[in-house]
Image (cartoon, rainbow, N blue to C red):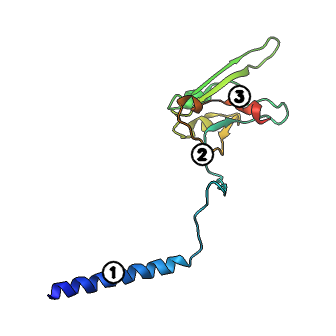
Amino acid sequence: MSEYWNDIFGGTKSLLVGLGITAREFFKPVVTEQYPWEVPVMMPRFRGHIELVKNGETGRPNCIVCGMCMRNCPSGCITLTGKKPEGEKKKVLTKYELDFTKCSLCGSCIEGCNFNAIQFSKDYNLASTRKEDYIFDLLKRLEEQS
């Protein structure tokens, strides 16, 4: 019989402790963001996929097609090509492709680039059911931003 009363008192004590915690937390300010209606502020250190950086003077990407980002990438998710136009001294970027399905967001490509040609983007809302939607043509995206 005493075990019966111990269970009742123990359960009542546990219930009151739980209600006390709930009552305390009820009056604290809400920290939940109402996502579709409130856009979250991205922290400066947020790592989205990489994107090309545009040169302010020429309007073209800073990339000189050296390939260091492609060589430094442990995942092998970067593909870039360039051509040397007639009469020019430097190569011009013709294709910069990122396969985001392979990317581990390690940042080795950005660290290896000595020309400030790529940076992490602030895109966070990437959702799709197709793999093709995660293969980005970064040169085309840079031109569309203009």
How far is disc 3 from disc 2 in space, using C-alphas?
19 Å
- What residue is at 27 percent from the left and 86 percent from the top? 9
Q: Nearer the viewer, residue 88 or 32?
A: 32
Q: Which residue is mark 1?
A: 14
How far is disc 3 from disc 1 in space, using C-alphas?
61 Å
Dot 3 falls on a residue whose secondary structure is helix
How far is disc 2 from disc 1 in space, using C-alphas?
43 Å
Q: Which is nearer the N-term, disc 3 or disc 2? A: 2
Q: Nearer the viewer, residue 88 or 26?
A: 26
Where is residue 88 shown, x and y percent of the image? Answer: 81, 16
Q: Which residue is mark 3?
A: 139
Q: Amino acid at mark 1?
A: Ser
- What residue is at 69 percent from the left and 19 percent from the top? 82
Where is residue 75 shown, x and y percent of the image? Answer: 50, 31
> Are the residues flagged by discs 2 and 1 in contact, CB closer than 8 Å?
no
Identify whether 105 is placed above or below 90. Answer: below
Q: Which is nearer the N-term, disc 2 or disc 1? A: 1
Task: Categorize mark 2 by other alpha carbons within 10 Å: few (<14), some (14-19), many (20+).
Answer: some
